[in-house]
Image: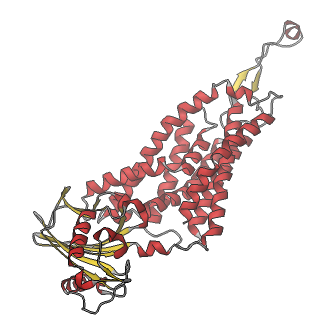
């Protein structure tokens, strides 16, 4: 039984080290990574609510609208003959960027488009953008193929300016997050908001209700914890040596309070803002997995584990906050509600993970497989968090004849790992290395 904690602990140590290596690798390669395409594939849009109309003014790069088939002369677009292609472009934009009112897609009643030079700066303001789209380009305008922009002004009928409006982009879905839509929402009343979304964002509320924001952030929290292998490994390391519910509740509660504290603080800008801090947090999270795994092997008491769990929980809270930062733009005016909902989602996801981990650990501890991974030696001094006292073997009759009748007890012994254990654990851990490398390199980019 006690050897199970040692075996699982060593496996977690391997995972933690393998998780740490890609971080260093990605940091070393990060300075040389330059992706100019990301900056170029940006669609700008204004959404303004005005009475019973919604005005959507869009600027899209030309290379995203190849299906419009613009007429060309040599290496330039024939601007004078581009009217039909511009109509097709306006229709493509209306299909790619969909506006919703109370969950129902609305159809534009009018659409107008024009070509613009790459150097044009009229989309810095809504007024400048609408005035620019209304004017035709000069007759001598020279726009090279796949350079410049298509600007469009779409007008949508709406039922009421107080409705909940949403937007969804499906532009260049095959490129995923490399094509983003920057939306500046201008409601009939209240402050304007800016959002940055992609085709993977789905339908995004521009003015969400508090219950809509709460539901969205609960789901986001659940997804974040269940897809975060680093947090799940750390949680598993916390549970491996525990045998009863009371210390499990104490450990998990400590972890929850600690990461909630730094998560909320980071959301309000109280975390360090330097570029060094996110890599430091990722490295510290990996180190926490290694430390807890080694502590499971060496043995630790509950009081010390509570303290260490709280300290590492603060670090994991910063990690949770990085998953939240890009999504806070979807909170609207409900920042506190969204923060609370995200934290609730984290805890719900954590409970779901526990419902899988705890029965799995019980099954593993009772499995005969781990007897193959261990060799029996004399009782040692290192014991798990809850070393149980078990009755010693009953002395023989000869031994009882020369001794007093005293109850004998002994502490459960620790079984070290055999050589075959290291081979099996190394093979299992190494099989996860490509996945960890892929995850860290993507996050580094």
Residue drawn where x is 56% and y is 32% of the image: 360
Whole-percent x, y for residue 175 in the image: 42, 62
* Residue nearest the viewer, comparing 7 with 67: 67
Residue drawn where x is 63% and y is 25% of the image: 366
Based on the displayed image, in which of its 4 quarters is residue 281 positioned?
Answer: bottom right
Residue 236 relative to residue 128: left or right: right
Q: Quadrant of the N terminus?
A: top right
Whole-percent x, y for residue 425 in the image: 71, 39
Rendered view: 393 above or below 213: above
Residue drawn where x is 55% and y is 53% of the image: 313
* Residue nearest the viewer, comparing 405 with 250: 250
Q: Is residue 299 visible?
A: no
* Residue nearest the viewer, comparing 56 with 27: 56
| Number of numbered discs overlaid on the protein picture | 0
Based on the displayed image, in which of its 4 quarters is residue 426 positioned?
Answer: top right
Instruction: Give the image's coloring scheme.
Output: secondary structure
Whole-percent x, y for residue 367 in the image: 64, 25
Residue 401 relative to residue 274: left or right: right
Whole-percent x, y for residue 269 in the image: 45, 70
Q: Quadrant of the C terminus?
A: bottom right
Q: Is residue 217 visible?
A: yes
Residue 212 relative to residue 267: left or right: left
């Amino acid at each position: 039984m006690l050897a199970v904690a040692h075996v699982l602990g060593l496996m977690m140590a391997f995972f933690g080290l393998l998780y740490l290596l890609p971080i260093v690798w990605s940091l070393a390669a990060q300075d040389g990574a330059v992706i100019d395409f990301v900056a170029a594939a940006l669609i700008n849009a204004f959404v303004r609510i005005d009475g019973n109309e919604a005005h959507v003014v869009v600027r899209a790069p030309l290379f995203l609208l190849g299906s419009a088939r613009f007429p060309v002369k040599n290496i330039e677009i024939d601007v004078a003959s581009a009217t039909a292609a511009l109509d097709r472009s306006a229709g493509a934009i209306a299909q790619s960027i969909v506006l919703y009112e109370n969950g129902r897609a609305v159809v534009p009643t009018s659409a107008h488009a024009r070509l613009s030079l790459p150097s044009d700066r009229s989309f810095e303001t809504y007024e400048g953008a609408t005035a620019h789209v209304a004017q035709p380009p000069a007759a001598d305008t020279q726009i090279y193929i796949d350079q410049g922009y298509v600007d469009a002004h779409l007008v949508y009928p709406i039922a009421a300016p107080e409705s909940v409006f949403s937007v969804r982009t499906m532009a260049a879905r095959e490129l995923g997050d490399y094509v983003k839509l920057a939306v500046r929402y201008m409601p009939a009343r209240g402050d304007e908001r800016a959002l940055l979304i992609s085709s993977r964002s789905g339908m995004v509320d521009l003015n969400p209700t508090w219950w809509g924001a709460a539901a969205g952030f609960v789901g986001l929290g659940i997804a974040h914890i269940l897809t975060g292998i680093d947090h799940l490994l750390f949680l598993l390391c916390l549970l491996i040596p525990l045998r009863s519910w009371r210390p499990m509740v104490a450990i998990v509660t400590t972890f929850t309070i600690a990461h909630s504290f730094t998560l909320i603080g980071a959301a309000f800008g109280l975390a360090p803002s330097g570029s060094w801090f996110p890599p430091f947090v990722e490295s510290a999270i990996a180190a926490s997995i290694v430390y807890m795994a080694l502590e499971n092997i060496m043995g630790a008491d509950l009081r010390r584990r509570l303290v260490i769990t709280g300290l590492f929980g603060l670090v994991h809270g910063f990690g949770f906050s990085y998953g939240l930062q890009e999504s806070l733009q979807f909170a609207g005016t409900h920042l506190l509600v969204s923060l609370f909902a995200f934290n609730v989602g984290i805890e719900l996801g954590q409970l779901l993970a526990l419902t899988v981990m705890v029965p799995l650990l019980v099954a593993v501890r009772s499995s005969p497989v781990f007897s193959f991974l261990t060799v029996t030696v004399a009782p040692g001094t290192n014991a798990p968090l809850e070393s149980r006292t078990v009755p010693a073997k009953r002395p023989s009759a000869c031994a009882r004849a020369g001794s007093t009748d005293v109850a004998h007890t002994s502490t459960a012994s620790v079984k070290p790992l055999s050589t075959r254990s290291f081979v099996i654990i190394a093979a299992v851990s190494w099989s996860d290395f490509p996945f960890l490398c892929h995850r860290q390199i993507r996050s580094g980019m």
